[in-house]
Image (cartoon, rainbow, N blue to C red):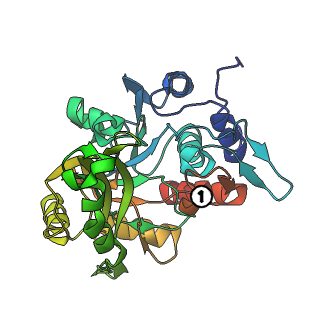
Amino acid sequence: MSHSALDLQQDAARLTARLVDFPSESGNEKALADAVEAALGELPHLSVDRYGNNVVARTGLGRAERVILAGHIDTVPIAENVPSRLDENGVLWGCGTSDMKAGVAVQLRIAATVPEPNRDLTFVFYDNEEVAAHLNGLGHIADAHPDWLAGDFAVLLEPSEGRVEGGCQGTLRVKMHFRGTRSHSARSWLGANAIHAAGPALERLAGYQPRRPLIDGLEYREGLNAVGIEGGVAGNVIPDLCTVTVNYRYAPDRSEQEALDHVREVFADCGVEEFEVDDSSPGALPGLSHPAARAFLDAVGGEPLPKYGWTDVSRFSALGVPAVNYGPGDPNLAHKRDERVETALITRCEERLRRWLTS
């Protein structure tokens, strides 16, 4: 086996470690995409296609139903946490262990070891999930080759601690611009301080009470928070521009436009000169009443939870494919310096998916 090859006969925990040791920060996924494509290309029961650094493999057994198993191969920037490390308690440490190379390892194991599933399968491995929405590889596939994503149901192996998580929140990032008048700080009365002008908006944020709506029996928790502030010219200048960036994580009963309208309403009397949408992706309703989703729930067990965060379940929903999140990682550890995953969860997730696809 070459240094760049993947051995899909390894158990899923070892395969996860191998994937983690392939650095694949967003925008630098080519080496890992090459390895995934090569490994899948050796499996005679799959047809393999590639678009950019996105790899799609499919069975063609003529089954009555087609299920998509999808996961992104990129990670956030490495924080001195690669190579991977397995401790004495069976916990694997490293960048991407939880989000979401453990889930990708499960996908690859199912692809290699379930040659005749009871449903036709599509495996999607895509890039640039951790960055701006317009760079997302799944979106690029949907635009260029929507037929590759045709299916009756999708499972996104995002971290969920082996629990089914329904739907996902929408996310909206808005830059709020405040303007003043520049002057020398020794003659501040001749200017108007744009940073001070942002004060009412910051006070509004500090007192904001987010909704907790109940949707299909799942309680979603919203959040509206400042995530950045820019302003200032020099140590002796009254600034004439200040920008406060807010991120609104909203429940899937609101559309993108309704989310933006809400943000505008919250800050309507706070002196905002301009609202600039920096990034926006809609949420997805749980859809757990769909027969395929119900069958999946019955097979893997447990009570479903809401997804706190945005995932590409939203993209599948927009394509008319009902989808859930189900993966072995812990979402609370995603993007952290001490990111890690319990290897027992990886094994359990793989076993339950195999049971669902072979029983």
Mark 1 highlights which residue? 333
Question: Closest to the observer: 86 or 290?
Answer: 86
* Residue 152 visible (yes or no): no
Residue in the picture at 26% in, 69% down: 200
> Where on the picture, by quarter, is residue 354?
bottom right
Quadrant of the image containing the N terminus: top right
Residue in the picture at 58% in, 44% down: 101
Residue in the picture at 28% in, 33% down: 140
* Residue 219 visible (yes or no): yes
Residue in the picture at 36% in, 60% down: 226
Residue furthest top in the image: 2
Q: Is residue 43 above or below residue 293?
A: above
Q: Is residue 112 above or below residue 357?
A: above
Question: Closest to the observer: 53 or 261?
Answer: 261
Percent coordinates x, y for residue 172 in the rendering: 27, 56
Disc 1 marks a residue whose amino acid type is Leu
